[in-house]
Amino acid sequence: MHVLILSTGYPTDYVALDGIFYRDQAEALAAEGHQVGFIAVNPISIKSVLTCKKFTFGLSTFKENGVNTFLYKYLNIPKYPTYTVKQAERRGRSLIDRYIQQHGKPDVIHLQCYEAILAVDYAKRKYRIPFVVTEHSSRFLTNSVPSSMEKYAAKTFSESDYNISVSEEFAKVLSNKYSQAFHYLPNIADTEFYKPSTSKSINGTFTFLSAGILNENKNHQLLLRAFSKFLQSGRKAELVIAGDGPVRESLSDLAKELGIEKLVSFKGWVSRADLAILMNRSDAFVLCSKKETFGVVLIEAMSCGKPVISTRSGGPQSIIKGKELGVLCDHDEQSLFLAMQEVYDNFAAYDSRVIRQVVLNNFSPGAIAKKLTGIYTNVLNK
């Protein structure tokens, strides 16, 4: 089968993790023997340019891990959301034509973000190529999709031949909002990258790990307060927080206010390689977000064999399906404290091999690629 992925996100020197889930799916499909192409019309923020001190825009073409890729980077205009639609349409159309000239007509297009709908609509009309869409954006959960973009989202989901969302709860939200059927298909965990190792904390202390951008939605304030309560219960542990963001300083101040700063370590931004090391050195992973469309860090930790704790924030309910994997809790200090206590007190009952096997069966590249192949086949047989 010939599959073309189209998105407005792809990993770059500016943002290393931008669109990484899309690229992972493309490479997983290629590994299954499909012919796979990728077109990304990538907006780059002014902030990213100033941070990286680079100005490398325009088109680059390359083949990586079996995927023929066309990556077009451009400087985004802040507070003008429809600019991404216009750029995706203008550049996307010409890149689709060029891709087909060089690599042939794909059987199906997989749109990874609704902002590129006009380019896909062009391909569907000109070349009669069906398309499926996966929606990832948490803006649909927080009702923060700009009003100027709503018509493009509605157009995408009504014209798509198959709508996918990355969690069961997210599928319900989108189905209710747009009166269209949405189907659950999770993101991929890189099970070869995130895997168990023998590394462990030198001091042997039980370690809770949390990772993610430090903002209000990730709710690390709740985690610090619950951890403080955990320590007050007489149990001994340390908390490691990886990531950076706008509330970093206030979190550090809160740790001092609670008197737990000596047992809380803020690691700042870490690479994927360093995150994998931290996961293997920890005993349990904690995610305490207010809203999550999926929660990929949970399956990455589980792929390392770690039990996980998460608030019921949307996506995690599709991941933590049994007590052998960890604990789901409510968005309050007492509930999170009790979840941390449960994992700590029953830690010996968790089997890292069982936890990892769940990831291999449901979230590995091969498992997701097979499910995608079935979806594409059904669309083409309509």
Image (spheres, helix red, strand yellow):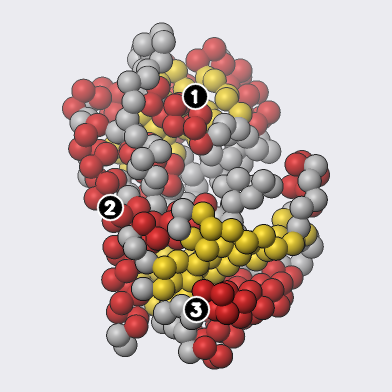
**Residue that carries the numbered disc 1 in the rendered image:** 240
- Of label 2 and label 1, which has the lower sequence position? 1
Percent coordinates x, y for residue 32 in the rendering: 33, 60
Q: Which amino acid lies under the numbered mark 3 shown in the image of this protein?
A: Gly
Q: Residues within 10 Å of mark 1 (few under 14, many from 20)?
A: some
- Of label 2 and label 3, which has the lower sequence position? 3
Report whether 237 appears left or right of 256: left
- Label 2 – label 1 distance at C-alpha: 28 Å
Residue 334 placement: quadrant = top left
> Mark 3 or mark 1, which is nearer to you?
3
Q: Residues within 10 Å of mark 2 (few under 14, many from 20)?
A: some
Q: Which amino acid lies under the numbered mark 2 shown in the image of this protein?
A: Asn
Report whether 41 appears left or right of 198: right
Report whether 175 appears left or right of 32: right
- Label 2 – label 3 distance at C-alpha: 32 Å
Q: Residue drawn at (74%, 47%), measured in percent from left and top? A: 48
Q: Nearer the viewer, residue 307 or 341?
A: 307
Q: Residue drawn at (29%, 56%), measured in percent from left and top? A: 367
Q: Residues within 10 Å of mark 3 (few under 14, many from 20)?
A: few
